[in-house]
Image: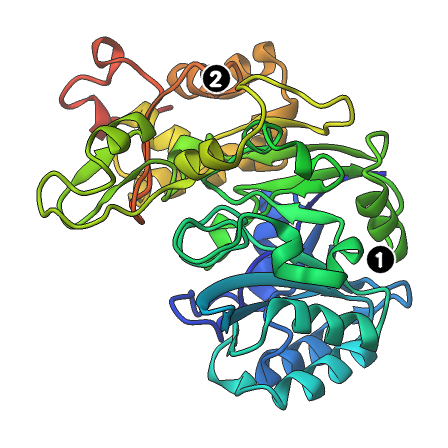
Amino acid sequence: MEFIADFHIHSKYSRATSKDMDVKHLAQWAKLKGITLIGTGDFTHHLWLEELKNNLEDLGNGLFKYQDTYFILTSEISSIYSKKGRTYRIHNMIFSPSFKTTDKINYKLSQCGNLASDGRPILGLDAADLARIIFDIDENCVLVPGHIWTPWFSLFGSMSGFDRIEDCFEDQTPKIFALETGLSSDPAMNWRLSCLDRFTLISNSDSHSPSKIGREANVFDCELDYKTIREVLKAKDKKRFLYTIEFFPEEGKYHFDGHRNCDVRLSPKETKQHVGVCPKCGKPVTVGVMNRVEQLADRPEGYKPSNAISFKNLIPFEEIIAEAKGVAPTSVSVERDYHSLVAKFGTEFDILLRASEEELHKGLPSRIAEGVIRVRKGKVKINPGFDGEYGKIAIFNESDKPREGEKQLSMF
């Protein structure tokens, strides 16, 4: 069966997350979005794990269920440690096939640090040692380096990472077969590194609130069970892993270089011209994902490996509605229109991915329909994100923006 999966989220027990990041609200929003399978996130936190055990039905195949939504046990570990005289900050996702395995993981990791401090615990644990612990407990676990290009906390981060995956995971490297690209990069950027060809690239929301789940996701056509999903990822099976759903990477918070406090945004070329320092304050800029990919790439832009899994760049429907109306995505009118329109089509992904142009024009206000179609065709303009600041997207040109007063009118 074809289904959409978002493996990387956080619970209400992680810092800076919504109080609604619980099983009930996650299931409600998964249904709205059209997501069949969602990661639990944060299984290392004792209170969240207790909620999961009390609320999820164990299907006996490595997956769990709440009402119509399937769950897979996942968590993220932040490792901050020194290696060969340098400090590294790496985030890794863990997939567990059972509560039994999860309990063993938590017991072992609790000896390395305080798991109760945060839903995403910070441990002084070498990433290679983390991998050894996980795979020694259960070889059916999956370890996925998270958002691998983010400057401050990732495998290849410009401020905190490695140049080679083997330097990070040492003898455990062969056991790792999937990488998470993160919001600020898409698969095409990763295709420029031949050393990544053997890895399956996955995309997830890393959501801190229910409405953000699925902003990046994965589309499969396979059996809904843990073992099969693991096999598909390990084999990089193009017949069963159809494509990933991506942000436009420029919208991510770390696509370009710069200084947020100085409001300085720089392309890699401009950073080079300024010798890596901020032209306002004179301090080193935060080097973003595009620049870091450029540093490590051994292929030109546009190269596509023969075994590459395809992807589709999308913008969340709430943002399209907001852009069409000329109001903020958080406005009451956007929320009202979102729920009304999604109810007509079934799910958000039915609108963004599946409905024909004719169906869009028939079922949506004309500007919103046009916005969805433009996004599908990649006809958007983006001022790239930098140093923790999301990029700004423009679907419509200034000439076809809503006139003053129109934004107050109903779209219906």
Instruction: Classify the position of the N terminus by image quarter.
Output: top right
Q: Residue at 57% across / 43% down in the picture?
A: 181
- The residue that mark 1 highlights is 226
Task: Say whether residue 80 is visible.
Answer: no
Quadrant in which residue 270 is drawn: top left
Task: Say whether residue 319 is visible.
Answer: yes
Which of 68 and 232 lies nearest the eye of the viewer? 232
As drawn, 316 above or below 379: below
Residue 145 percent location from the top left of the image: 62, 55
Quadrant in which residue 64 is drawn: bottom right
Which of 80 and 87 lies nearest the eye of the viewer? 87
Residue 307 percent location from the top left of the image: 78, 27
Colour mode of the rendering: rainbow
The label on residue 378 is: 2
Left or right placement of residue 244 versus residue 100 in this view: left
Left or right placement of residue 124 versus residue 187 in this view: left
Distance CA(mark 1)–CA(mark 2): 34 Å
As drawn, 362 above or below 335: above
